[in-house]
Amino acid sequence: MQGVQAFIPTSLKIEYLNALLRIELDTLDFGSFVSPKAIPQMQDTAEVLRGLDLTDTTTRLLAIVANERGAQEACSHEPLTYLGFPLSLSETFQQRNTNKTIEAAFETISATQALCSRHDKQLVVYLSMGFGNPYGDPYQTEIVSEFAHRLDHMGVGIISLADTVGLATGQEIKATLRSAIEEFPQMEVGAHLHASPDTVDEKVAAVIDAGCQRLDGALRGYGGCPMAKDELIGNLPTERILEIVASEALTPAASEALQDAMALSAKVFA
């Protein structure tokens, strides 16, 4: 939702997210505790959280934070399981996305991990530009390993490699994910990929072939990172991921909830 210019009414966000909760997904990234000046769309995240119906769902909630203040606010909400933090392998993108250097971001991660430990939360660190970047900043797969080692030493248990602008091929995704999974068996390694419509199936197949079991999506592939570049590259469509990996596993109730959420998404992203 963060890239939508017009403010999405809080009541519509709640209705949409409640439909998503009924699909029985593992995790729902429902909002962000970030500056309303930076991301105006997320200014009502706390109010949205209060409106979510969590009485009959196993789905766990994740909220994005970009600084220690946001992490403190997120940790004050008992229903949250995960805090997500965007750490970039690209210095340029780290500045664009969080207005801080990579080293300053590591300091924030250290403080956020300490908060998570005290408040029984789990930190998910997204390695943005995890497969390269459009800015000409240095990139090689060894940097992924270097960053993961530092995060492991800090106690971070979950990382997600992000193809923020959809640069990676299926083969690059498969090789990089498989290498990280093999090198860091003690960590949960996920994938947060952006793709054009004609590369979705290739990228989902690459994730599966790599042995990765944490994969992010968004209904209809909506979204993208407004901090990355002028043109947004969409997310992997959740409904297509489900068709590929879990179509027969969805209960009738979950399938109905998916159709409800698909219909509501047309209103949310109108």
Image (cartoon, rainbow, N blue to C red):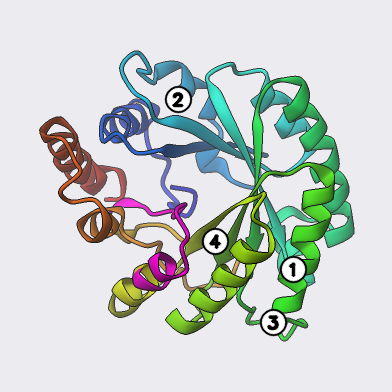
The amino acid type found where label 3 is placed reads: Tyr
The amino acid type found where label 1 is placed reads: Ser
111 in relation to 218, above or below: above
| Residue stretch rendered in magenta on the structure | 205-219
Label 3: few (<14), some (14–19) or many (≥20) C-alpha neighbours in 10 Å: few
Residue at the spot 58% in from the left edge and 16% down from the top edge? 78
Secondary structure mostly taken by the magenta-highlighted segment of the chain: loop
Is label 3 in a helix, a strand or a loop? loop
Residue 194 - label = none
Is 201 magenta? The answer is no
> Disc 1 and disc 3: Cα gap in Å?
21 Å
Is label 2 in a helix, a strand or a loop? helix
Between discs 1 and 2, the one toward the N terminus: 2
Pointer 4: what residue? 226
Is 211 magenta? The answer is yes
Pointer 2: what residue? 48
Tell me which corner region of the image, top left, top right, bottom left or bottom right, holds residue 88: bottom right
> Disc 4 and disc 1: Cα gap in Å?
27 Å
Q: Nearer the viewer, residue 96 or 199?
A: 199
The amino acid type found where label 4 is placed reads: Pro
Residue 48's x, y, as percent?
Answer: 45, 25
> Disc 3 and disc 4: Cα gap in Å?
15 Å
Pointer 3: what residue? 135
